[in-house]
Image (spheres, rainbow, N blue to C red):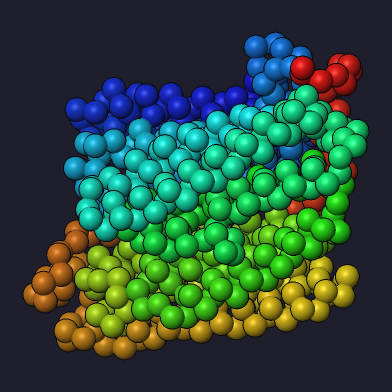
Amino acid sequence: MTWLPVLPIVIPMATGVLAFLAGGSPALQRLVALIGAAALLIVSVVLTAEVMTNGIVAAQMGMWQAPFGITLVVDHLSAVMVLITAITGLAVLIYAFADISEGHVHFGFHPLLQLLLAGVCGAFTTGDVFNLYVWFEVMLISSFGLLVLGGTREQLDGGIKYVALNLISTVLFLGAIGILYGMTGTLNMADLHLRVQEVENGGLLTVVAMMFMIAFGIKSAVFPLFFWLPASYHTPPVAISAVFSGLLTKVGVYAMIRMFTLIFTEDVAFTHTVLLWVAGLTMITGVLGAAAQNEMRRILSFHIVSQIGYMIMGLALYTPLGLLGAVFYLVHHIIVKANLFLVAGVANRLAGSFELKKIGGLYKSSPLLAVLFLIPAFSLAGFPPLSGFWAKLILVQAAIEIQSWAIVAVALVVGLLTIYSMTKIWAEAFWKPHPKGFDPDMSGVAGSAAGVPTISRRDIAILIAPIAVLATMTVIIGLYAAPFVDFAAASAAELLDPAPYIAAVLGDAPLGSAQ
C-alpha cells in the first residue's frame, strides 16, 4: 500500500488539469471537479483506514532510498488532515455550484481549487522539509489566484497584503532550510530528527528554530503576524473564503507541530515557552478584533486568528494531553470555521449584506438556517456537548495538569468573548427584524422587492446541503467524542515518540546524510 500516499496529491492535480482542459464548458468543469473531489475523499478514507490498521505508511519516490530521495509519509496526524481536507474540499465545491459565477468558473476557479487541494495534501504528506516549502509555494500561487479571481479593487488590495507577507514568510522559510541543511547535511524529516542531536552549536540551532517559527507563524496567522488574514479573507466569494478559513492557516499550524515535535526539541524550555506566549497573545488579540467588528466575515476572520491560539497552546504545552488537544482542535476547527463562512454566505444571499446593521429577520423566516448557524457557532464558543467543548476542555485540562494557570485563564476568558461575538451575529442577523422591513425567506422573493437579488430554491438546496452535512459532523464529534479522542491520542503518541515514524521512513537504510 506504499502507493497510497501519492494519490491525495495526484488526484487533485489530475483533476485540475482536466478541469482546465474543459475550460470551454462550465458544466463539464463542474462534473470533472465533483468526480475528482469524490475520488479524493474515497482515497483519504482508505488511507486513514490503512494507517489505523497497519501503522505509518511511507513511500519513497523514484525508488530512491531515504534520506536521499523524496519521501511521502502518512501517520495518524497526516491521515486525518488529508481526510478533513477532502471533506472540506468536497463540501465547498458543492456549495460553489450555487455560489461561484460563470465568470469565475471561466477564469479558472475549478483548476485553481484543485491545485490548492493538491498543495495542502502535499504539505500534509511530505517527509522532506524542502518539499514542504515546495507545497507551500503551490498553495501560495493557487490561493492568490483564487483570492483575486474577479479582480475587484477590494480583492486586489487584500491580495497584495496576502502575497506580500507570505513572500516574507517564504524567503525566511527558504533561508532557514538552507542553514539547517548546512548544519545537518539532510532535509529528510526523519533523518533530521537524528542529525540535529549531533549539532554542536545549540545556539545556532535555536536561531534556526526561531526562523522556522516566524515563517510558519506568518502562514498560521499568529500574533503579531496575522494582519494579512483579516485584511484579505473577507474579499473573495464565500466558497473561496470558506476553503481558505478551513485549510490554509491549518497547514501552517500542522507544519509547526511537525517541526517542533520531530526536529526542534533540543531546547524545549525556550522554544515552547515562546510558543506559549504566542498562543496566549494570539487568542487575546484575535478575539478582541472579532468583538470590534460588525461585518460577519470580518468577525469570523478574526476568530480564525483567535482559535489558532488554542492549537498553538496545545503544542506549547508539549504533553500527551496538550498535543491530543491540539490535534482534536485542528480537526474540529476546520469543520466549524468553514461551515460558519458558508452560513454567512447564505445569510448574505437571503438578507442582502454581510453588514450586521443592514440585515436581520433570518430566524423568523429561515429557522433551518438559524439552527445550522447555532451549531457551529456554539461549537466555536465551546458549548457542550458539541466538538468545541471537548477541544477546549482537553486543552484546559492539559494546562491545569502542568499548573500553567495563566494560559488557563486566557483560554477561558477568550471563550467567553467568543460567545459575545457569536451572540452579536445572532442578535443582529437572526433575531432582530430586517431594517428594510421584509422577511428574507428561502425563496428570496420577499427580498427582491427590497433590492436583494432573488435566489432559486434549487440554489438554496445546493447551498444548504454541505452546511447541513458539516453541522451534522460537528454534532457527531461532540456526542460520540471517544473514538475521535482516541485517534487524536494516537496522533499525540506518535508525535511524542517519533521512533515508529523514523523506522517507517528510514527502515534498515544506513542513517547517513544526503551530502
Q: Is residue 480 visible?
A: no
Q: Compared with residue 372, is residue 144 higher up or lower down, i.e. above or below?
A: above
Say which residue appears at 87% left-offset and 35% top-offset: 199
Question: Which image quarter is the N terminus in?
Answer: top right
The image shows residue 16 at horizontal and vertical percentages of 38, 29
Q: Compared with residue 504, is residue 355 higher up or lower down, i.e. above or below?
A: below
Along the line of sight, the residue nearer the viewer: 347 or 355: 355
Taking the image as shown, residue 370 lies to the left or right of residue 409, namely: left
Say which residue appears at 75% left-offset and 53% top-offset: 488
Outermost residue, top direction? 63
Say which residue appears at 19% left-offset and 59% top-offset: 456
Taking the image as shown, residue 289 lies to the left or right of residue 58, namely: left
Q: Is residue 171 visible?
A: yes
The image shows residue 407 at horizontal and vertical percentages of 74, 74
The image shows residue 437 at horizontal and vertical percentages of 17, 86
Along the line of sight, the residue nearer the viewer: 69 or 340: 69
Taking the image as shown, residue 193 lies to the left or right of residue 213, namely: right
Q: Quadrant of residue 229?
A: bottom left
Question: Which image quarter is the C terminus in?
Answer: top right
